[in-house]
Amino acid sequence: MPEFSAGVSRLIAITAVGVLLSTALGAQTAKQSVVPASAPDYGIRVEENVWVTMKDGVRLSGHIFFPVGKRRGERFPVLFHHTPYRETAASRYGASSYLVRRGYVDAHFQVRGTGQSEGAVPDREYSDQEIADAIEVIAWLARQPWSNGRVGMYGVSWSGFNAAQVAMRRPPGLEAISVGAGTEDLYHENIQYLDGILHFGSYNFGIDVRTTMSPPPDFPLTDAIFRDRFDQPPWSLTFLKQQRDGDYWRRGTRLDLNPDAIAIPTFMIGGWVDTYRSSIPRALEHMKAPTVAVIGPWNHDLRDPGPAVEYRHQQIRWWDYWLKRRNTGILDEPRVTAFMRYSHLPDPWIRGRDVAGEWRADTWPPRGLEWKPWYLQPDHDLRPTPPSVSATHQLKYLPAVGPQAGQYWTNTQPDQRAVDGFSLVYDSEPLTADLAILGRPKAIFAASATAPLAHWFVRLSDVAPDGITTQITGAGLNGAHRESSTDPAALVPGKEYRFEVNLHVTSWVFKPGHRIRVAISNALWPMQWPSPYPMTTSLVLGPERGSTPSAQILLPVVPLESGFPLPPFASIVQETDSAMPGAPPPPPLRGPLGFNARKPQKIDRDEIAGTTSVSLEDGVPGNITKVVWRVSDLRPDLASIRGERINTVRIGDREVVWEGFTEIRSDSTNFYYLHRRWVRENGRVVRERSWQDTIPRFFR
């Protein structure tokens, strides 16, 4: 894929609109010298409770932050953020102030049926209605008298997801987007079917209650509100019925299947410990529109974005280029700025600013990349040469393996030796020099199972000289999806299959004296639902023979230095967000770091019954989720999850509580689903509903 430069007329034009934009902007910027990013020259004015009427008469509610102009009638580019998370002007003021002070209108609108917006809650995340509404809002923003007609859409998590989805529709007025911690692959990388395997966690409980809540600030409990929100089916029931990949999940959006899907310039922000980070290399490799990415040592919310970095500066340079027509030089620079993490000890509560490493500007694929195979050996070593003799390593399936590996492919996890003790483990000799990797490692191996369904999980770790083991990355593979996730097929027990597992993208610099570890298991619970059959799996080792590969992991090895200068944002200390004048301070959050309110999970093992339970509580006062997962060694089909979510608001002498309870149980053929919800006012039940269903288990 060619590099894009500041001469935008060189860009590949995908649509007629793209051709016109390319020609016009190229002619303009060719005469300009590179200019710095917009400075914070403006004051801030907030307009709360702005209403925009959709073509069907439903009104969406929002807050708009305006720059205080230097001259009468000054027009500004507009940034648009679309979310269901009931945000207030006060809660967005700090983040918005960074943008507004640099000459951008920042508009935040709540998804239909959420927050103060009217209408029925959508039937799923990123619904067609949500996307259609966003396109109408963009058109409205572009034609306002304070707008210069150019709109950018942005956000982190949900609002990053829908920015990408809207960009795929190519609406007039939308000229660039910024996607933070999001993905367009809704099946494999969203949190319902991680790696093609069922996942059910605390988010699923929370969203099924959050969507039932009445509009603030009065939280009315009327029949009309109940009809549009409380009485709508839970999303978790919907996605449990969509167990295979296909139209429901794809909707024409997979960039690897449809590189033309996004023709709008895209800025991407990811974290090395965020679940959705693998969307970034896919976009860089397949998108034809200009794409720039920043990947740091951050988790999903991209908070605490150290060390010594202000990535919003880079984002402003992006917006300036596309929405203000200023040549900031951003397209002349390497497309990726990534934080190369150094070997460090495992720490579930580590801050991004405390992760050892350094920033690196690079191309994609990285310059000097070499794919280096490391081969799994019969003696459990890991070497750069294939073994000369063959062997088979067997692993008895234990469905309770995995709590220490985390509940998503996210966050730094604790020492992995507890998980590795029930996995097939292969270690290199201590390294004698630094070894840097940047990209998506790939595991290739042949294996069989004594059951018609098995999952394989591959994890890459760093083993310190004292044996402490830090998980770097990993991924899972549903054995039924070995050829297709849209048309899965059972395994033939005892038959040997070739598997390839693309681990989630990562960066790491192994230090001298450390070892590379590859660990393979058939369970990673409770991150992913256990396969239903007792079994033993066999991993084939030895030299390549016919269609049977030599078991290996391919590491994306890069030079320690890329040779490119860093863009300016990597040396700018993060600005402190300001609070909205007159707004009360935010409530303090629990947790070891202050911003993380999750308590450590608790693991209970009953050796006599052969069962394991994992329990978790997270949230903040008034919004609490409690979850318990349970699985049996002898009957892995009898797995279950039970959880409750309680959201409480107090308005004067009223206390209104929305509560939901969900239970999913399984056997070898079905999932058994139960969801109940209540709303109470001052202790009295005002409304209650329940859903119960039996759903056939489809290669899960």
Image (spheres, rainbow, N blue to C red):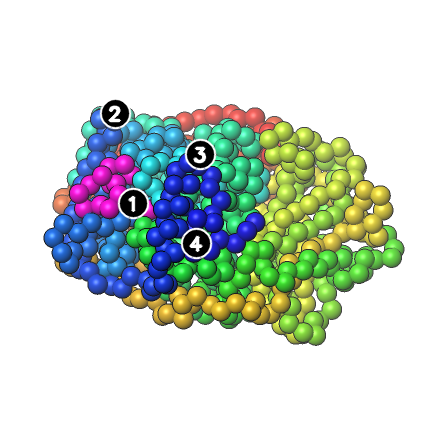
Secondary structure beneath dot 2 equals: loop
How far from the left and from the top, in percent, is residue 620?
33, 53
Magenta span: 138-152
How far from the left and from the top, in percent, is residue 643?
43, 41
Mark 2–mark 3 Cα distance, whole angstroms, equals 28 Å
The residue depicted at 24 percent of the width and 56 percent of the height is 103
Secondary structure beneath dot 1 equals: strand
Name which residue type carries label 4: Gly
How far from the left and from the top, in percent, is residue 201?
47, 44
Residue ID for mark 4: 7
Q: Nearer the viewer, mark 2 or mark 3?
A: 2
Question: Which sits earlier in the primary sequence, circle 1 or circle 4?
Answer: 4
Q: Nearer the viewer, residue 179 or 638?
A: 179
Mark 3 surroundings within 10 Å by alpha-carbon count, few (fewer than 14), some (14 through 19), many (20 or more): some
The residue depicted at 53 percent of the width and 37 percent of the height is 258
Question: Which sits earlier in the primary sequence, circle 4 or circle 2?
Answer: 4
Residue ID for mark 2: 56
Number of the label disc, if any, that sits on residue 150: 1
